[in-house]
Image: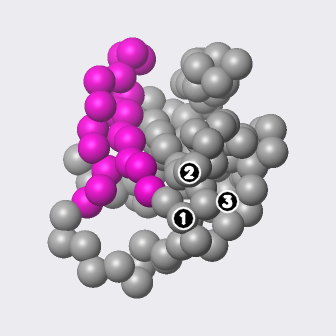
């Protein structure tokens, strides 16, 4: 499967304090390929933090891991990283589809991910 930059997707960033493991918040990034825009919504007390720009990394292997997805015809990818200052740990979860339009699955995905943190 090719890169998520080539199609619409929903990206959740669940953030936790590294020392206490306490949940701080979630950022939802929705990328609409056909509209050429991103929408960003923060939930809880998501802390804006500095992180290494992925484009400056020299990784030859992707940190994204394809996980089992509870929704038909969707691909779920996960990755974990930390802020540069090591204060925050983020669990990234990305949903995308080759066949379905974002409008067809966005509500179900958002409800599913939000219910995981409530």
- Res 102 seen here: yes
Q: Secondary structure at mark 2?
A: loop
10 Å neighbourhood of mark 2: few (<14), some, or many (≥20)? some
- Image quarter (top left, top right, bottom left or bottom right) of the C terminus: top right
Say whether marks 3 and 1 touch (CB < 8 Å).
Answer: no
Say whether marks 2 and 1 touch (CB < 8 Å).
Answer: yes
Q: Which one is earlier in the sequence, the residue at label 3 or at label 1?
A: 3
Question: What residue is at 41 percent from the left and 79 percent from the top?
Answer: 55
Per the model, the C-alpha gap separating discs 3 and 2 is: 31 Å
Q: Which residues are magenta?
A: 62-81
Per the model, the C-alpha gap separating discs 3 and 1 is: 30 Å
Q: Does 55 appear in magenta?
A: no
Residue 109 location in percent, x, y? 57, 25
- Residue tagged 1: 86
Q: How many numbered callouts?
A: 3
Q: Does 63 appear in magenta?
A: yes
Q: Quadrant of residue 65?
A: top left
Question: What residue is at 58 percent from the left and 25 percent from the top?
Answer: 113
Q: Residue reaching furthest front? A: 19
**Does residue 104 lie above or below 32 as drawn?**
above
- Residue tagged 3: 37
Q: Secondary structure at mark 3?
A: strand
Q: Secondary structure at mark 1?
A: loop
Q: Which one is earlier in the sequence, the residue at label 2 or at label 1?
A: 2
Question: What residue is at 19 percent from the left and 64 percent from the top?
Answer: 61
Q: Which one is earlier in the sequence, the residue at label 3 or at label 2?
A: 2
Say whether marks 3 and 2 touch (CB < 8 Å).
Answer: no
Name the residue nearer the viewer: 48 or 2: 48
- Res 28 seen here: no
- Residue tagged 2: 18
């Amino acid at each position: 499967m090719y890169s998520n930059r080539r199609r619409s997707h929903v990206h959740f960033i669940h953030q936790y304090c590294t020392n206490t493991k306490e949940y701080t918040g979630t950022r939802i990034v929705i990328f609409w390929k056909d509209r050429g825009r991103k929408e960003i919504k923060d939930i809880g007390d998501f802390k804006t933090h500095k992180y290494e720009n992925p484009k400056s990394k020299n990784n030859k292997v992707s940190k994204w891991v394809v996980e089992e997805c509870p929704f038909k015809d969707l691909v779920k990818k996960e990755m974990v990283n930390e802020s540069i200052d090591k204060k925050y740990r983020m669990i990234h979860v990305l949903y995308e589809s080759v066949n379905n339009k974002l409008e067809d699955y966005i509500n179900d995905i958002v409800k599913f991910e939000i219910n995981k943190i409530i």
